[in-house]
Image (spheres, rainbow, N blue to C red):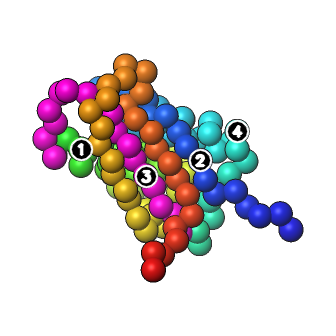
């Protein structure tokens, strides 16, 4: 039996309001990368996400960084808008509890095409 693929790397679309529409664009970008690589996640999979944000020279409050991370996790769960109990689109990661590690990297490099990069991979404990 062939090994399942877990890892994908996705360019994060530039942030733009409204926030819910940006979540849809993040979801679509991840879904496209998943399809292209033949990657799928099961409810029993434990995952790690690495988020590299290119922020340029614009100073951002920690609150703004925290909100981008929350938006990305919500997009992966298919939670775009509305009450938490209602999914608006199909989840990529069925349950946020599957995400065992989030690594956030900030860069001062700037790009108008992407906000950065999102990598999803299998969670491995570090010894």
Extent of the magenta region? 46-63
Work out whether residue 108 or residue 97 is closer to the camera in this orientation and state it: 108
- Residue 97 in the image: x percent, y percent? 43, 68
Q: Which mark is residue 127?
A: none
Q: Of callouts 3 and 1, which one flags the residue occurring earlier in the amino acid sequence?
A: 3
Q: Residues within 10 Å of mark 2 (few under 14, many from 20)?
A: some
Q: Residues within 10 Å of mark 4 (few under 14, many from 20)?
A: few
Work out whether residue 71 or residue 125 is closer to the camera in this orientation and state it: 125
User: Which residue has dot 4 on it?
Assistant: 36
User: Which residue has dot 3 on it?
Assistant: 50
Is-magenta flag for residue 73?
no
Under circle 2, the secondary element is strand
- Residue 66 in the image: x percent, y percent? 24, 49
| 1 on left or right of 48 | right
Q: Which mark is residue 8?
A: 2
**At 70% across and 44% down in the image, what residue appears?**
37
| 73 on left or right of 109 | right
Q: Quadrant of the N terminus?
A: bottom right
**At 61% across and 53% down in the image, what residue appears?**
7
Q: Of callouts 4 and 1, which one flags the residue occurring earlier in the amino acid sequence?
A: 4
């Amino acid at each position: 039996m062939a090994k399942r693929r877990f890892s994908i790397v996705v360019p994060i679309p530039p942030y733009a309001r409204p926030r819910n529409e940006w979540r849809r664009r993040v979801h679509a970008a991840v879904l496209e990368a998943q399809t292209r690589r033949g990657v799928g996640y099961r409810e029993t999979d434990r995952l790690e996400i690495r988020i590299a944000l290119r922020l340029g020279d614009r100073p951002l409050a920690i609150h703004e960084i925290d909100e981008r991370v929350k938006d990305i996790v919500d997009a992966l769960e298919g939670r775009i808008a509305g009450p938490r109990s209602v999914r608006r689109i199909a989840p990529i990661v069925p349950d946020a509890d599957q995400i065992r590690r989030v690594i956030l990297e900030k860069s001062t490099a700037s790009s108008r095409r992407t906000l950065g990069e999102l990598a999803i991979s299998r969670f491995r404990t570090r010894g």
